[in-house]
Image (cartoon, grey):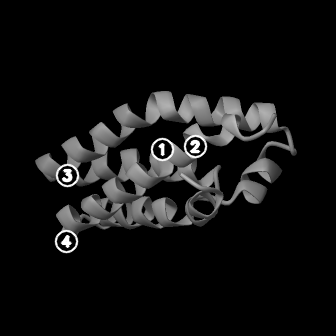
Amino acid sequence: MDEIDTVAILNLAAALERVGGDQELLEEVAQLFLETSPDLFAAIGQAVQARDARALERAAHTLKGSVGNFGADAAFQAALRLEKMGRSGNLTGVDEAYHVLETEMQRLRPALATLGHGSG
């Protein structure tokens, strides 16, 4: 993935600002996210499949906070959309919203994985 793609997916300046400019800490936070996000994403998928609005709200809210740390606006907005659906209990369009989040997560993970490989 080239730098232009990464910039479009996450906001490195915003992410660094959130960790006080500490590149090493940002890399650690990214690694932790890469380790924990599959389980969280799976919980969202299970909530969507079960049409469990409350579980969807909780899991999407947690994921939204995590992706927000990286300035990953598209993933943040996708998680926010699912969180709002869960909160309202109106799951109309939830499968499509889940697919959008899935796509954004597939874009975000490789971008985060490259954080530690370009600084050196």
Q: Amino acid at mark 3?
A: Val
- Looking at the picture, tell me which residue is in the foreground, 105 or 88: 105
Q: Amino acid at mark 2?
A: Leu
Q: Which mark is residue 109?
A: 1
The image position of residue 15, as x and y in percent, is 72, 51
Callout 2: SS: helix
For the point 77% across and 32% down, the residue is: 25
Residue at numbered disc 4: 93
Residue at numbered disc 3: 48
Q: How many angstroms separate mark 3 from mark 1 (CA)? A: 21 Å
For the point 12% across and 47% down, the residue is: 50
Q: Residues within 10 Å of mark 4 (few under 14, many from 20)?
A: few
- Looking at the picture, tell me which residue is in the foreground, 67 or 1: 1
Q: Amino acid at mark 1?
A: Arg
Q: How many angstroms separate mark 4 from mark 1 (CA)? A: 25 Å
* Comes first in the chain, label 3 or label 1: 3
Classify 22 as above or below 97: above
For the point 59% across and 57% down, the residue is: 6
* Comes first in the chain, label 2 or label 3: 3
Q: Amino acid at mark 4?
A: Gly
Q: How many angstroms separate mark 2 from mark 4 (CA)? A: 29 Å
Tag 1–tag 2 contact (CB < 8 Å): yes
Q: How many angstroms separate mark 3 from mark 4 (CA)? A: 10 Å
Callout 1: SS: helix
- Looking at the picture, tell me which residue is in the foreground, 106 or 2: 2
Residue at numbered disc 2: 112
Q: Quadrant of residue 14?
A: bottom right
Classify 84 as above or below 120: below
Q: How many angstroms separate mark 1 from mark 2 (CA)? A: 5 Å
Q: Residues within 10 Å of mark 1 (few under 14, many from 20)?
A: some
Q: Quadrant of residue 28?
A: top right
Mark 4 vs mark 1: in front: 1
